[in-house]
Image (cartoon, helix red, strand yellow):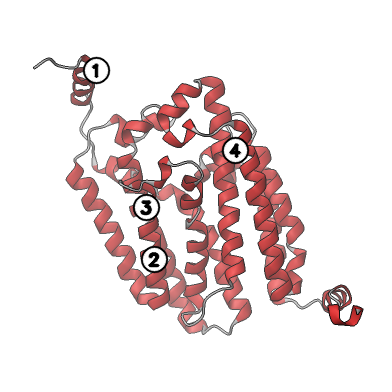
Amino acid sequence: MPVNPEETTRIEALGAQPQGRASDYLSLARFDHVTKHVFILPGLILACALSEPDPAALVINIPVGLLSAVAIASANYVINEWLDRERDAAHPTKSQRRAVVVEMQPRIVYGEYLLLAAIGLLLASVVGKLFFATSLLFLLSGILYNVEPIRAKDKPYLDVLTECLNNPIRFLLGWAIVDQVTLPPVSVLAAYWMAGAFLMAAKRLGEYRDIAANAGVAVLKKYRRSFEYYTEESLTVSCFVYAMMTAFLLGVFLVKYRVEYILVFPFISGLFAVYLWLATRPGSVVQRPERLFHSRRLDVMLTLTVVVFLFASFVNVPMLDFMAASFLVPISSLQ
């Protein structure tokens, strides 16, 4: 039987790889991405603002819940990096990931995935039923995004909408740490989802601009199938659509639940503006979310947003209630 030269070269290259060490397997879990769990905090804060939490329960639930979220996210990262290793080899920087450059044993990788998932779910069961159910959804989202036959990451737009499910899931995890009985408003979950879609679309825009300019569009398409359908223009437009949807859904939430949150809106808008600006920069940090906090502008805007959000959550501003009552005149009174 004739042998394919390309296949022979690939096998020889694989054989030349060094054997993976314990540190290489641990790197798959991406513990340095722990900063992403900051998205849990708004759900936790809002639940505290809209309910009366038990302080004694929070002392246990907050650290246990955060550790559970980290373990399940790391399980998702393990399966992501392992299944993406062949395509990551075409990426200018991801080609240096350990799953690409060293030889790893599949049984160890899948064992690591199962161990992290089991730890995450075990800890989640300590917090409560809603937190456990949300954690299962968190784990399932990683499978839908990475694993065949669905593998949503290869499909345009669906890749963004599936990956950013992590945002409302993290919000719900934060909420469930405080409140196991009720659910957060659908409007704020949907807004969080669309905000996540904006972040992911901006990330892809940054990748498109950077890789297409330096390595060419062909390399970009080899790295990720969904880029076969994207253009710089379509990604930019999608960013604006997701931002507009976020603004609309946030408006619904603001009007219905707490008028003080209108103070946060200008800062959220500024946060979006800074993020989109970063996405257009060469070598943008939005391509590597674990490095986002290396941007001073983003750090300042995020800090201001969090401070104002905390203020609006726990401080009543009577003037805003008066203004809302003045502007939101019932239609019947105008007839």
Q: What residue lies at 38% left-to-right and 77% top-to-bottom?
A: 129
Q: What label does residue 6 carry, if any?
A: 1
The earlier-in-sequence mark between 3 and 1 is: 1
Q: Label 2: few (<14), some or many (≥20) within 10 Å? A: many
Q: Is residue 67 left or right of residue 160?
A: left
Mark earlier in primary sequence (4, 2)? 2
Q: Is residue 211 left or right of residue 144?
A: right
Query: In the picture, which quadrant includes the C terminus?
Result: bottom right
Q: Which residue in the structure is indicated by mark 4? A: 235
| Identity of the residue furthest to the right in this view | 334
* Residue ID for mark 2: 135
Q: For the residue labelled by badge 2, is the local secondary structure a helix, a strand or a loop? A: helix
In this rendering, would 56 be left or right of 120? right
Whether label 3 touches label 1, CB < 8 Å: no
**What element does badge 4 sit on?**
helix
Which residue carries the number 3 mark?
A: 144
Q: Are marks 1 and 4 in contact (CB under 8 Å)?
A: no
Give the amino acid at mark 3: Leu
* Local SS, label 3: helix
The CA distance from mark 2 to mark 1 is 42 Å
Q: Is residue 25 above or below residue 209?
A: below
Name the residue type under label 1: Glu
Q: Please give the label number shown on residue 285.
A: none
Q: Amino acid at mark 4?
A: Leu
Q: Nearer the viewer, residue 26 or 147?
A: 147
Classify 167 as above or below 299.
Answer: below
Distance from disc 4 to disc 2, alpha carbons, whole Å, reads 30 Å
